[in-house]
Image: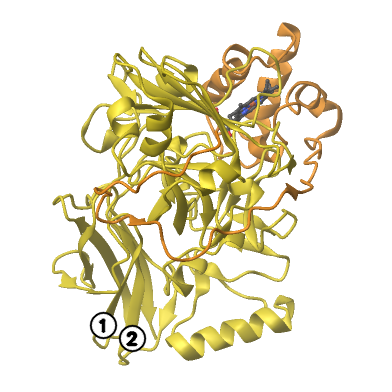
C-alpha cells in the first residue's frame, strides 16, 4: 500500500513539511501526506481510496470530507501524533439530520428538564455556569469509527480511524441537574434531545437515552467547554452530553431537552439503529441472521500508530522510535505492547502522562535495528479491566465496535 | 431558577476535578454558514431519478462515497430511506434509482 509521489505535484509547503517530518522521525509518513490536489489516501479496505481534504467548514481546519450535508468530517491521523488532546478545530464532526441551527443565541438558549420529575426546569447557560463545575478528559469515538476497514464492506460513513478525538470537557454533572428537578420514584431512563431536526415531518428525530442509574452515576456530564473553549457549533455548541467510556452516539450535541421517562425508550435511534449483536466483540458471520441485538454501549480498548503509516519505509539498521495513542474504552490503559515479529513476541511500550482513565494515552517504543526488507509491526492495548484487543477483526452489518490489533507493514531500506 | 448555587457534593468520581479554579469560559452567541452540499449525482439523464429523490436529506457524496455493494444491498438501502427515514420516493422511480446505484456503485453481485 505504499504511495508514490509525483514530485512536481507536491506543493512547496507540504513538501517542506514532509521533509521536516522525515528529519524528526527518521521515517516517511507515506500514508498520511496531504497531496497536491488536496486529497488524502485513506488506508481503508478498498474504494474509494482518495478523499478530499476540506477547509470549508466553520471553526474547522483541515478535515477529511466524508459528507458535506449534514457534515461528516474526519480527523486526519497525523493530528493524533501532535498531542494527546485533539484540537477543537480538527475534532471530527458527525450529524444525522441536516436541519442544524446555524445560529445559536447564548442568552436566549434554554435547556429544559422535564418528564418524570417533581419540578420542570428551564436552565439558561448562566444557570449552568453557577452550578459546581467539573472537568474530565475523555475520548469521544463514533460507534462506526474504522468502518472503512470492514470486509465484506458495509454501508455507512467509510471512516478510517479518525472518527474519534480526546478533549478536556468542562461542565456540570448531569446528576446535579437531575437532582435540581427531583427525579420521581419509578424513573427508568433519561432521554436526551438536541436542536437538530429531521428534514421531513414524521421522520425519527435523533434522540438517545441512558438508564436512570447511569445518568446519575456522577460521571455523565453536560459540557459547555472543550479544551478550555466553548464548543465549535459543529461539535454541539452550546451544550453537549458527555458519557465517559461510551460510544459517541450517546453524546447528544446542542443538548436542549432532558426528559425523564418512567419506561424504556423505544424510539428508533435506541431500539433499531445503533444496536449490535449480543455476542463477544459484537461479532457475527456475514449473512448470519436471527441474532439478538442490543443497544451499543461501552467502548473497548484500542491503540494506534501515529508516526508510521502502513506502507512507510525507514532506514535499515537504524534505531527508530515508534509511537502512537491508546485508550482503554470504559477503563484505563493498563499496558500497550508492540510486536515486530507478526505477533509472536510482544514488548511493553512506555506510556505517556496519565490524564485519567477515559483519556487517550500516548505510547512509545524504541525498536531495534530492522534488517532490510518487509516487517509487520503490531500494537495492542490491555485495559485495567483486563480486556485486550483481539487478534481477529470483528464483523457486523453496521460496521460497529472495531478494535482488532492494528498492524502496519514497513519496509527497511 | 435564580438560586442554583449549592454546596459542592463530597463524592465526585476520582477523575473529575470539581469546581476548578479557572474562571468560566465565555460562552458567546455563534452564527456560522455551512456549505450547501448541493452537487448533483453525475451521469446526466441516467441520474435523473436519483437526483429527483435522493438529495433532500443528504448530499450526493453520502452515496458516492459508499463502497461497491451488491444490488440487493442497494435495494434495501433505498427501501430503508423510504420506510425508516420517510423519503418521499415515487414507487415508479425505485427501479431507476437501484439501477443507477448498481451500475455506479455495484459490486457485480
Q: Position of residue B42 (x, y in %)?
A: 79, 38
Front residue of this view, candidates A271 and B61: A271
Question: How many residues crowd mark 2 within 10 Å: few (<14), some (14–19), many (20+)?
Answer: some
In orange, which chain?
Answer: B
Q: Which residue is mark 2?
A: A320
Q: Does residue A48 appear anywhere in the picture?
A: no
Q: Residue at x 72, y 13 (%)?
A: B88
In the orientation shown, which residue stands out farthest toward the front?
Answer: B3
State the SS at label 1: strand
Along the horizontal axis of the image, is B4 left or right of A55? Answer: left
The span from disc 2 to disc 1 (Cα, nearest Å) is 6 Å
Percent across and percent down for residue A120 are 50, 21
Work out which quarter of the rendered image holds the N terminus of chain B and state it. Answer: top right
Of the pair A149 and A182, the residue shown nearer to us: A182
User: Circle 1 is placed at which residue position?
Assistant: A367
Q: Residue at x 53, y 54 (%)?
A: A225
A165 vs A230, left or right, is left
Q: Which chain does the yellow colour mark?
A: A
Instruction: Determine whether A276 is above or below A363 in the image.
Output: above
Front residue of B32 and A177: A177
* Residue at mark 2: chain: A
A413 lies above or below A295: below
Q: Is residue A44 visible?
A: yes
> Label 1 neighbourhood size at 10 Å, few (<14), some (14-19), many (20+)?
some
Q: Secondary structure at mark 2?
A: strand
Amino acid at each position: 500500500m505504499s504511495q508514490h509521489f509525483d514530485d512536481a505535484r507536491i506543493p512547496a509547503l507540504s513538501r517542506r513539511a514532509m521533509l521536516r517530518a522525515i528529519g524528526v522521525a527518521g521515517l516517511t509518513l507515506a500514508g498520511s501526506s496531504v497531496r497536491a490536489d488536496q486529497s488524502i489516501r485513506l488506508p481503508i479496505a478498498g474504494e474509494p481510496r482518495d478523499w478530499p481534504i476540506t477547509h470549508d467548514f466553520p471553526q474547522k481546519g483541515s478535515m477529511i470530507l466524508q459528507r458535506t450535508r449534514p457534515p461528516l468530517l474526519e480527523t486526519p491521523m497525523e493530528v493524533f501524533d501532535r498531542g494527546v488532546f485533539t484540537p477543537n478545530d480538527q475534532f471530527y464532526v458527525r450529524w444525522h439530520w441536516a436541519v442544524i441551527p446555524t445560529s445559536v443565541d447564548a442568552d436566549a438558549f434554554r435547556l429544559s428538564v422535564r418528564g418524570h420529575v417533581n419540578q420542570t426546569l428551564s436552565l439558561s447557560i448562566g444557570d449552568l455556569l453557577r452550578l459546581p463545575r467539573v472537568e474530565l478528559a475523555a475520548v469521544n469515538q463514533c460507534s462506526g469509527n474504522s468502518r472503512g476497514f470492514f470486509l465484506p464492506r458495509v454501508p455507512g460513513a467509510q471512516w478510517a480511524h479518525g472518527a474519534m478525538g480526546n478533549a478536556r470537557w468542562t461542565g456540570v454533572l448531569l446528576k446535579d441537574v437531575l437532582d435540581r428537578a427531583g427525579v420521581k420514584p419509578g424513573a427508568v431512563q433519561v432521554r436526551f434531545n438536541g436542536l437538530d431536526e429531521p428534514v421531513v415531518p414524521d421522520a425519527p428525530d435523533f434522540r438517545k437515552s441512558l438508564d436512570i442509574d447511569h445518568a446519575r452515576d456522577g460521571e455523565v456530564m453536560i459540557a459547555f467547554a472543550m479544551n478550555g473553549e466553548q464548543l465549535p457549533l459543529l461539535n454541539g455548541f452550546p451544550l453537549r452530553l458527555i458519557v465517559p467510556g461510551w460510544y459517541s452516539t450517546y453524546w447528544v450535541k446542542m443538548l436542549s431537552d432532558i426528559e425523564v421517562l418512567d419506561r424504556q425508550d423505544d424510539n428508533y435511534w435506541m431500539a433499531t439503529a445503533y444496536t449490535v449483536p449480543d455476542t463477544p466483540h459484537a461479532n457475527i458471520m456475514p449473512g448470519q441472521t436471527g441474532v439478538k441485538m442490543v443497544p451499543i454501549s461501552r467502548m473497548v480498548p484500542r491503540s494506534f500508530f501515529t508516526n508510521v503509516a502502513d506502507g512507510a519505509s525507514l532506514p535499515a539498521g537504524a534505531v527508530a522510535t515508534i509511537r502512537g495513542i491508546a485508550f482503554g474504552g470504559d477503563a484505563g490503559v493498563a499496558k500497550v505492547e508492540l510486536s515486530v515479529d507478526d505477533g509472536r513476541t510482544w514488548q511493553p511500550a512506555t506510556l505517556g502522562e496519565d490524564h485519567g482513565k477515559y483519556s487517550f494515552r500516548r505510547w512509545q517504543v524504541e525498536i531495534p535495528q530492522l534488517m532490510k526488507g518487509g516487517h509487520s509491526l503490531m500494537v495492542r492495548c490491555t485495559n485495567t479491566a483486563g480486556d485486550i484487543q483481539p487478534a481477529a477483526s470483528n464483523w457486523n452489518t453496521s460496521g460497529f465496535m472495531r478494535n482488532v490489533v492494528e498492524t502496519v507493514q514497513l519496509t527497511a531500506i | 431558577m435564580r438560586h442554583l448555587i449549592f454546596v459542592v457534593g463530597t463524592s465526585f468520581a476520582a477523575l473529575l476535578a470539581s469546581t476548578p479554579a479557572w474562571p468560566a469560559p465565555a460562552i458567546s452567541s455563534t452564527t456560522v454558514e455551512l456549505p450547501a452540499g448541493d452537487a448533483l449525482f453525475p451521469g446526466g439523464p441516467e441520474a435523473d431519478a436519483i437526483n429527483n429523490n435522493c438529495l433532500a436529506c443528504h448530499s450526493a457524496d453520502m452515496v458516492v462515497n459508499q463502497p461497491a455493494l451488491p444490488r440487493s444491498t442497494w435495494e434495501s438501502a433505498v427501501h430503508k430511506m423510504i420506510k425508516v427515514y420517510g423519503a418521499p420516493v415515487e414507487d415508479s422511480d425505485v427501479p431507476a434509482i437501484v439501477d443507477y446505484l448498481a451500475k455506479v456503485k455495484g459490486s457485480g453481485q
